[in-house]
Structures are given as C-alpha cells and as structure tokens.
Amino acid sequence: MQTTDLTRETLRRLADLRPEGVRVISVYLNLDPAEFSTPQARETQVHSLLDDAGRRVDADETLSHDQRGDLRADLERLREYFEGPDFAPQGAHGMAVFLASAADLFEVVRLPRPVESQVAIDDSPLVEPLADLVSSGGWAVLLVSSKTGRLFVGSRERLEEVESFRRQVEAPMDQTGGGSQARNDRAASQGQEDHLKQVADILFRRTKRAPLDRLLVGGRKELYNAVEAELHPYLTERLAGHVSVDVENATAAQVHEAAGPLIEEEDRKRERAALDRLEEGLGTGGRGAAGLEDVLRALNERRVEILMRAEGFRVPGVVCRSCGFVGPAELEECPLDGGELERRDDVMESAVELAIEQSAEVIVPRQHDDLERHDGVAAVLRF
C-alpha cells in the first residue's frame, strides 16, 4: 500500500493508469470533521459504500469470472484496510483509495478538503474529483519574526503547520568599552539576516519536495521586504502578499482565517483570467471552445490548455475503449476507428482524464457564472 499527498504528478500518473483486462475500485471518503469526526460515523459510511459496491459487482453481467473474483477479493481487502491500524484519517478532510490487486495497485491519497463519498468500478481510477482539488493550487504561509520561523502549508480550505524553528540569540557583549553598543547592533543585524536566510532556505528545500503555487508572508510589515530579498526567484514569483498574524502564538485555524481573503482573491483573479482568455478565444474564432461537442472535439484533438466546467456539471456521452475517443451521446460508432462505443451516464470523467493526459489545467469556476451561457463546459485552446 502506498500513501501519497495530492499533487499534479500523482493526478497525472493515476489518469494514465489503465491496466488491461483489470477493473479498478476507486473509493472517495468524506472526512469532514463536522460530519464524520467519530470512528462510528466513518465506519458506517465505509460499510455503506462497500456494501453498495458488492451488490454492483454481483449484478454486473459484463464482468468475466476472473474479474468478478478479483473485485470481491479487493472489496474484502478494503474492508480489512478500513478496519485496521493502517487507516489513519486524522488530519485529512477527505481520502481517495484506489485498488486493483491484479495490477499491483493499492494507493491512498489524503485530500485537503471534503469530497463526495462514492465508489466507482471501472477500467481506470476515477480522477475527476481530484482534478479540481489540484487546480485550486497549493498554498504556503511563512510566519517570520526576528527570532522565529513557522511554515504552514495546505489549500484554500485548510492549512497545517509543518515546520517551526527559532534562532539562537547570543548574549550581548560587555558594553563598558567604547564601541561595544555598535558591535552589538551589528551582531544583532547580522543575526537577523542569517536567520532570514535560514528561513528562506528551509522553505525552498521543502518546495523542491512538494511544489507550491502561492506564498504568503506573515509577521511585522517591515520584515516583509527583508524576507522577500532572501527568497529564491521560484518563491518570489509566487508571493501573493502579506498577512497580519501573531507569529509566536497563532494557531493553524487563525493563520487560515487571516490568509482566507487573500486566497479567495487569488482564486477569483485566476478564474477571471481564464474566463477572459476563453471569451477572447471565442471572439476571434480561434483559441476557445464552448459547449459539449466543440469541447470534446478539441480534447480528442489534444488542443486543450484549460478545461472549464460548471460545478456539478454532468452529461451523458460515449467512450471508445480501443482508441480512447470521447464523444456526445448521440454517436453510434467511433468516428476514428469505427470501434464499439461504451455509453456513460457521465462522460465528464473521461473528458477530465483526457484533459489531464494532455497536461491541461482543469478549473471549476465558483466565483463567476460565465459558463452558464456556454452550456456548462468550455475550454481555452493551445492552437
């Protein structure tokens, strides 16, 4: 079993996974503390999901004998996992579990915000719920004083403290001799500069392991420029502003509350920029597509840079198992290879997978309603 955090690399790897002849079980758990804070509540949720999945496996006449046996064994393995010591939901607001023993897949992804609880059984992992989480970006808040550094990372929904360190302050020199105060002042200034360099270095080394999208700095306003001067250019490009917060004593919840308005404003600007590019592309008849048919055509042609869909948007469609073509529901055969089409109640999962495969960003606008006039789905195109 592999436990990972959600990153773009994780999303791309899961979207590319299609084990031949093997069905994958995808389980999404809502771990919102307001609803599922107790083990009993989580256990009830898990049992309901797995019982429903078991009934679907028994009723699915398209499964081969081996596939049905593998799925039953994997569902039992999931029950054992959720009832055992390896299941550690603490600190996560959601969780995704992907299992296909026949393909040597058992991966747990901890999620930064609640998700809709569901189970899917298909020939690839269900990644659509993850795409929006990744597109909202990873955030870091660095709290700095002349003696302390604290680092919080997370998303627009939640931040958690991952690093904390203090500078060792040397005792002042004997000030009886001439010039002692000046030396002490220089030493204090050099000590603070070294401290800020250390803070910036720790942050950069961490981001090489876990990249972030935007950075906020908290503490005294006069330290902001000094911190910025020490940051690596990668981090300077991601600076989104300053927050006022008690560096020494603020809790993660208080840091998140202080950062919230800036995070929300960044989300609003990012959505607006993408929607403006869409309108520009549509207006010139070039790099924009709107409506299901045009968007799916662009996805099949690998031309999509940003896929945008309204929250909760679902639509039936078809998928060609042999070549991966995704199309609207009215098609009877694959226009690319004449292959048999598989009908899907919701084709957006396949559309999102196709977008991820071509390294497209997936955005679900929540602060603008532009997609209403485009039937709920649109795309910015590369060419």
Image (spheres, rainbow, N blue to C red):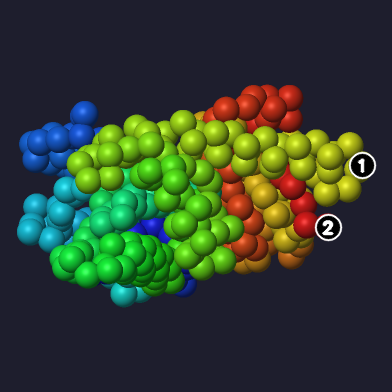
Residue underneath mark 2: 383
Number of numbered discs on residues: 2
Please, is residue 284 above or below residue 351 in the view? above
Q: Quadrant of the N terminus?
A: bottom left
**Location of residue 271 in the rendering, given as x and y in whole percent from the top left corner:** 63, 38
Q: Quadrant of the C terminus?
A: bottom right
Q: Secondary structure at mark 1?
A: loop
Residue in view at x 50 percent, y 53 percent: 225
Task: From the viewer's perspective, tell me whether residue 132 is left or right of residue 40.
Answer: right
Q: Tell me which label, 2 or 1, sits earlier in the chain.
A: 1
Q: Are marks 2 and 1 in contact (CB under 8 Å)?
A: no
- Determine which of the numbered discs, if any, sits on residue 342 in the image: none
Residue in view at x 46 percent, y 50 percent: 224
Task: From the viewer's perspective, tell me whether residue 183 is left or right of residue 339.
Answer: left
**Location of residue 75 in the rendering, given as x and y in whole percent from the top left corner:** 22, 56
Residue underneath mark 1: 284
Q: Secondary structure at mark 2?
A: loop
Q: Residues within 10 Å of mark 1 (few under 14, many from 20)?
A: few
Residue in view at x 31 percent, y 55 percent: 146
Task: From the viewer's perspective, tell me whether residue 81 is left or right of residue 223.
Answer: left
Residue lying at the far right of the rendered structure: 284
- Distance from label 2 to label 1 (Cα)? 12 Å
Amino acid type of the residue tagged 1 in the rendering: Thr
Q: Nearer the viewer, residue 72 or 6?
A: 6
**Location of residue 362 in the rendering, given as x and y in whole percent from the top left corner:** 59, 48
Please, is residue 73 above or below residue 40 in the view? below
Amino acid type of the residue tagged 2 in the rendering: Phe
- Is residue 11 shown to the viewer in this render? no
Q: Residues within 10 Å of mark 2 (few under 14, many from 20)?
A: few
Q: Nearer the viewer, residue 226 or 323?
A: 226
